[in-house]
Image (spheres, helix red, strand yellow):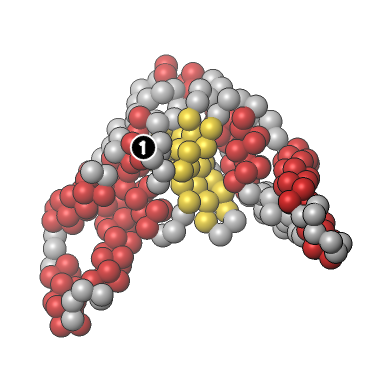
Amino acid sequence: MSDLAPYMIWEKQEGCLCAQHCINSLLQGEYFTAVDLSEIAKNLDQAEHAALQEGVEQVPTGLLRENVSAQKSQNMDDSGFFSVQVLSHALKVWNLELVPVGSEEGRNSKKIPEEEEAYICNLREHWFTLRRFGGIKSRWYNLDSLLNGPEWISQIYLGMLLNQLETEGYSIFVVRGILPTSQADEYAISHPQPVEHDSDLDMAIAASLKSVEATDRTENLNNTNHQNLNSKGSTNDELSIDDLRAKRLAKFENKNV
């Protein structure tokens, strides 16, 4: 369900410019280009190199100083990748802050994720945004530039999705601050909210459960023998969709305690 799609700013993936697409979809405007982000990255590189040079000023040989100057950028590369430092610096213009969900400050975002405004996710140099519109808990959307378009995320599935992404190794940052109001925000407020159907929830739970069950089996290898592990696998095969739903929801709740 993507009834807001015609009113959203969503950029289809071009090259490796996912960081640019990620920020613009978060802000709902074409505010940053690859050139803008490159300038931020260069400024960060210069500041980092200056700090390193200052630390080796007393070294008698110039070899170390030459190595520092020759270091490659840690904030961007030729493919179009930009570091989290670049994204964080760009968002400071809007008084927005990226907080790791695993940090002390970001820990509460796992308990009631639908009350946040947005999340930025990263894995292997790919960035994308999960954003709420109109301040409405049922108006979350996946704005990943690799998708065919914005995808609606139900209030229940949001927490499951974040849990699944974290299990798969994603770095997740909660966006703190006030996002600029967009046309999609205004539409979200003035039109009926999406309705979640049981079939949609069942499919979401079943898909999310696969990732969690795989992780559970890996963890159990360190604590149980192969016979017990195989027994657990056969039991899972006999579970009904209602059992899967209850098991997945219980798993999610335990993860967020």
Which of the pair 145/74 is nearer the observer?
74
**Quarter placement of the N terminus:** top left
Q: Position of residue 52 (x, y in %)?
A: 74, 51
Q: Is residue 203 left or right of residue 85?
A: left
Q: Position of residue 221 (x, y in %)?
A: 25, 76
Q: Is residue 214 above or below residue 6?
A: below
Q: Residue at x 60, y 38 (%)?
A: 88
Residue matched to label 1: 109
Q: Is residue 9 left or right of residue 257?
A: right
Q: Is residue 218 above or below residue 8?
A: below
- Seen from this angle, which residue lies furthest right? 62
Q: Is residue 64 left or right of residue 117?
A: right
Which of the 4 quarters of the picture holds residue 27?
top right
Q: Position of residue 123 (x, y in %)?
A: 52, 56
Q: Secondary structure at mark 1?
A: helix
Which of the pair 2/243 is nearer the observer?
243
Which of the pair 150/159 is nearer the observer?
159
